[in-house]
């Protein structure tokens, strides 16, 4: 069995700014978190993993298949799907329609099936609908299935995005700050849900997260980025006590009088 | 129950009234209004569709027997309903603002006009054209395919463009097609330039039906087909993908929507409806020239879609009907009335209308009134007459 997902030496520059420099990353199963201060390059990494950005250097492979150069929808079809930091639902579509769009890469109907309403079309549509209801159930949104996404409360929108991402039947799920704006209670409910997904579906999850309590509680591994470079990696406990990580988050300890913490 | 009676009475009486007063525009508007009522009121579904079917299949041609101009209006409405439904896919569903839509209508129209008239002999030599009338039926499909291909050709270079940029490019595309039609009379005479092409053959009609009725029924048939295709697309993964692109293109890509394929499909589908109607239009008119395919026509169709309600099939239908009737009947009638007042020398506040300078010609108020209606609609009902409604699914728990 090849390793599920592996990135090697990923570098990305925007003009003169190096957003990512020579980042290695790998995940095979379980939940792996990426943390780091704002602007560390976490979301850029996700955008490269999902094909929205092209990396300048490096390799990304999913089940030994190179991903660089593939379109986002092709990557989704292979089994990688994501959510967005600033929720990007299809605002004027209902919750269930949002989930149904997520299934697009799993539909093999021809235009002819659609226009003729063939038995195959009817069968597929009803299967899709019942799967969509199942997913909404899973994230606790079954009663809101017909509500337009824009009218859902904030927490529900986050969970709907998760359901939409799950709709493409991914083997690897990328979640960009899924608990942002949630209360501690909501956040730990969500983490419970994620744990369930890992256990039931054998999903691997990469998490970008600022909520340290969540990260420490749920992650199997933690990767720390700072200024586009990986500065630490390992089990949560280990990373927590890593000197460079503490420095990145809190600044350098004053060693001599008058020394400035950061240039 | 009461509503059902009202609906039947309205349709029946107004149809009777049109037959009795075939020259009165107001009475014909009443008939159209009664159809709108039937369409909108809460009626049992079989009654609603029965009434609409009877009105369109039986009453309308009968009215046309009394006043053939009304049948012409109805045929024009049919043509514009199909155009609005086509543009609705591109603009309303997929959110791709297309300001050159009439180009596809032109492509369809010219595809039949060239081979359905002696003009093709000029291009190819010989005496084999015009093609026999029955080829018209084949060319309904050829026009569809040609327009769809043109749609894809337009789509390819604009795949990366959104919003304003896309609008400008499609505007340019529409102008390019019109300018081509205007100037492709040399070096090889394809379009006969501004002089246009005539006479364009008309097909043999079934049962020897008169052409007025024939084109009305053909337009009706095409509109029904277009509505069915439109509904089926909208209610499938294709329609959902289009709407997802409209809502958030980046998220749609990340969720597995093949952007290239879906955008090209939207352009091709929208264009194909216009192509079919173009073929019908050229045969109906017998004569076409580039003047029928100006930028203003594209804007007119866009106004229909927006006025009706973006992304809504009933909206596009009603929008197209309202705008066409407004242009062909209401505003024309209004300017005729003003003209009569002027000619009769009516005085308003001691000022004789006959003394109005020519700059205030009543015909000039037509566009102004249309403009005011558009402005008022956008202020007070920006979502359109029949805004798109989300489908509510029955869910088993």
Image (cartoon, coloured by chain):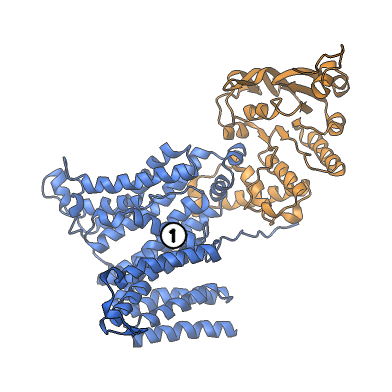
Q: Position of residue A102 (x, y in %)?
A: 64, 43
Shade representing chain A = orange
Residue A20 versus residue B334: which sits nearer the camera? B334
In this view, B206 is above or below A215? below
Image-quadrant location for residue B397: bottom right
Q: Which residue is mark 1?
A: B303
- SS at mark 1 in the image: helix
The residue positioned 25% from the left and 48% from the top of the image is B181
Q: Residue furthest top?
A: A256
Residue B331 versus residue B246: which sits nearer the camera? B331
Quadrant for the C terminus of chain A in the image: top right
For label 1, the crowd category at 10 Å Cα-Cα, with few meaning under 14, some 14 to 19 and many 20 or more, is some
The residue positioned 57% from the left and 49% from the top of the image is B240
Of all chains in the rendering, the one displayed in blue is: B
Quadrant for the N terminus of chain A in the image: top right
Residue B353 versus residue A242: which sits nearer the camera? B353
Chain under callout 1: B
């Amino acid at each position: 069995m090849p390793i599920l997902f592996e990135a090697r030496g990923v570098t990305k520059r925007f003009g003169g700014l190096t957003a990512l420099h020579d980042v290695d990353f790998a995940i095979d199963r379980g939940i792996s978190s990426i943390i780091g201060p704002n602007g560390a390059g976490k979301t850029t990494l996700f955008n490269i993993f999902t094909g929205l950005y092209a990396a300048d250097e490096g390799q990304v492979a999913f089940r030994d298949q190179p991903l660089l150069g593939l379109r986002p929808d092709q990557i989704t079809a292979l089994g990688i799907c994501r959510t967005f930091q600033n929720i990007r639902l299809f605002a004027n579509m209902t919750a269930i329609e949002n989930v149904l769009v997520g299934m697009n890469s799993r539909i093999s109907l021809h235009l002819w099936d659609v226009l003729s309403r063939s038995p195959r079309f009817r069968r597929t549509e009803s299967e899709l609908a019942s799967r969509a209801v199942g997913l909404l159930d899973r994230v606790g949104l079954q009663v809101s299935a017909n509500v337009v996404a824009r009218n859902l409360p904030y927490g529900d929108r986050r969970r709907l995005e998760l359901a939409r991402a799950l709709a493409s039947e991914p083997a690897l799920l990328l979640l960009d700050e899924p608990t942002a704006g949630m209360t501690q209670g909501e956040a730990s409910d969500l983490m419970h849900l994620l744990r369930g997904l890992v256990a039931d579906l054998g999903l691997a999850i990469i998490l970008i997260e600022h909520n340290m309590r969540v990260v420490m509680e749920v992650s199997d591994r933690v990767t720390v980025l700072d200024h586009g470079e990986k500065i630490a990696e390992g089990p949560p406990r280990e990373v927590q006590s890593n000197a460079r990580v503490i420095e990145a988050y809190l600044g350098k300890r004053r060693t001599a009088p008058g020394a400035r913490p950061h240039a | 129950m009461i509503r059902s009676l009202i609906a039947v009475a309205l349709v029946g009486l107004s149809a009777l009234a049109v037959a009795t007063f075939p020259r009165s525009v107001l009475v014909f508007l009443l008939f159209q209004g009664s159809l709108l009522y039937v369409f909108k009121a809460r009626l049992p579904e079989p009654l609603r569709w029965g009434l609409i079917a009877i009105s369109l299949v039986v009453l309308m041609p009968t009215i046309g027997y009394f006043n053939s101009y009304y049948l012409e209006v109805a045929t024009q409405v049919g043509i514009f309903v199909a155009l609005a439904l086509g543009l609705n896919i591109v603009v309303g569903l997929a959110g791709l603002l297309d300001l050159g839509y009439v180009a596809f209508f032109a492509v369809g129209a010219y595809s039949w006009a060239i081979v359905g008239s002696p003009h093709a002999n000029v291009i190819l030599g010989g005496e084999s054209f015009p093609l026999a009338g029955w080829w018209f039926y084949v060319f309904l499909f050829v026009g569809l395919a040609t327009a769809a291909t043109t749609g894809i050709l337009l789509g390819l270079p604009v795949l990366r463009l959104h919003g304003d940029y896309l609008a400008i490019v499609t505007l340019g595309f529409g102008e390019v097609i019109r300018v081509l039609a205007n100037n492709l009379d040399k070096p090889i005479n394809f379009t006969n330039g501004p002089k246009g092409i005539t006479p364009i053959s008309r097909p043999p009609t079934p049962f020897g039906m008169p052409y007025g009725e024939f084109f009305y029924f053909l337009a009706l048939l095409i509109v029904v087909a277009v509505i069915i295709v439109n509904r089926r697309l909208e209610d499938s993964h294709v329609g959902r993908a289009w709407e997802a692109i409209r809502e958030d293109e980046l998220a749609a890509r990340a969720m597995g929507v093949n952007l290239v394929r879906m955008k090209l499909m939207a352009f091709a589908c929208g264009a194909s409806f216009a192509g079919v109607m173009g073929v019908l239009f050229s045969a109906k008119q017998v004569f076409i020239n580039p003047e029928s395919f100006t930028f203003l026509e594209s804007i007119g169709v866009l106004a229909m879609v927006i006025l009706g309600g973006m992304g809504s099939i009933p909206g596009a239908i009603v929008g197209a009907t309202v705008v066409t009737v407004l242009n062909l009947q209401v505003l024309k009638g209004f300017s005729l009335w003003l003209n009569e007042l002027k000619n009769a020398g009516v005085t308003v506040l001691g000022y004789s209308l006959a003394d109005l300078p020519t700059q205030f010609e009543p015909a000039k108020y037509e566009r102004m009134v249309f403009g005011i209606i558009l402005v008022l609609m956008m202020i007070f009902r920006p979502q359109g007459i029949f805004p798109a409604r989300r489908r509510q699914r029955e869910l088993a728990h």
